[in-house]
Structures are given as structure tokens and as C-alpha cells.
Amino acid sequence: MTLDELYHHALTILPDAASDLQRAGRDPSEYVFASFDGGSELGIAFIASDLVGAQHSDPMCARAEVERMIASARGRGEELVVSVMIGKDVLGILLAASRVDRPTRAAMRLWLEGAAPRGQYRVVAINGDQVRARNVEQSEIDHELEPEPISMSMLN
């Protein structure tokens, strides 16, 4: 999956994630919505750590299960994407574990200082050593999610 596809995926899911946080009484501006390839080393590590925490399983067994899930998804022609609303500190840990270069990580730390401006969300897509990060206004999300016109090629 390309960086742009991951970013668009994040924008697609962002409204639901923000609503979930608000229902839980949390301020979405204090979080970052991150999306990355579940089949990457970063994605495998993230999913496996979630399995270890949720199921109290052995880390190596969890990793083997994630690799099995990825192989199964690829066999069906599908890709796994991890999209999560996370705290800035967790994003820092993810970036440190990623292949993103030091200057980009430093720029990301500066961008993450303080809360997002009112009415905006922080959205990040990570693909290998590439990062796409911006503050996104609600109106941009609404525009991004407008349905595409149906063409004849889409119906075939």
C-alpha cells in the first residue's frame, strides 16, 4: 500500500475514531490518528504487542500469529492496515522503531508539541521510511470523503 493510500485510509476512518474518543470523554486534539502497513515490521510489532497485552500470550507466539494473519490476507489479495488514535508519546515510540530518518523524527516531535489547533486533528501515515503528517480540519475530512462519481469502468 502506498503512502497516499495509507493517508487516505486514515482520513476515511478518522471521523469514527474521533467520535469514539469524544464518547469516552477524551479530547481528540490530544491524540494523533496514525495509519501504517500492518505487514511492515512496524505493523507486525504493533499488532503482536497488542495480542500479547490482550491475550497475555508469549511474544514469539503472537508474532507468529500475526505473520500467519498477514500471509492469509495476502493469499486473499488483501492488505492489513493498522489505523489507531494514539497519544503523542506512543507515536514517538512508533517512529523510533520505524525506518524514518532522524531529521524527520525530530521535525515530527516539534509538530507534536502542544495540542492540535481547535477544530483540527493530527493525521499521520507511515510507510517504510516515508511519513505524511498534517493537521486536518473537519471540513477537509468531509470533502475528502465525498463519494466519487460512478463510472462505467467501475461497474464492469
Image: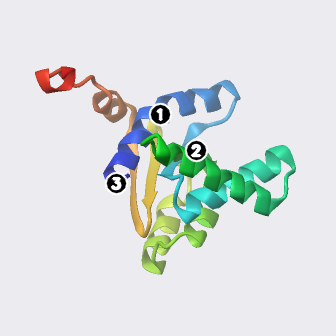
Amino acid type of the residue that numbered disc 1 sits on in the rendered structure: Ile
Q: Residue at x 40, y 38 (%)?
A: 11
| Label located before the other in sequence (3 or 1) | 3
Checking the image for residue 13, the label placed there is 1
Frontmost residue, 57 versus 108: 57
Does residue 32 appear in the picture of this structure? no
Checking the image for residue 119, the label placed there is none
Q: Residue at x 57, y 57 (%)?
A: 43
Total marks placed: 3
Q: Residue at x 84, y 45 (%)?
A: 55
Q: Secondary structure at mark 1?
A: helix
Q: Secondary structure at mark 2?
A: strand
Residue 142 vs 42, above or below: the answer is above
Dots 3, 1 in contact, CB < 8 A: no
The image position of residue 134, as x and y in percent, is 38, 52
Q: Which residue is mark 3?
A: 2
Q: Quadrant of the C terminus?
A: top left
Q: Which residue is mark 2?
A: 84
Dots 1, 2 in contact, CB < 8 A: no
Amino acid type of the residue that numbered disc 2 sits on in the rendered structure: Val
Amino acid type of the residue that numbered disc 3 sits on in the rendered structure: Thr
Mark 1 surroundings within 10 Å by alpha-carbon count, few (fewer than 14), some (14 through 19), many (20 or more): some
Frontmost residue, 144 versus 120: 144
Q: Residue at x 49, y 73 (%)?
A: 99
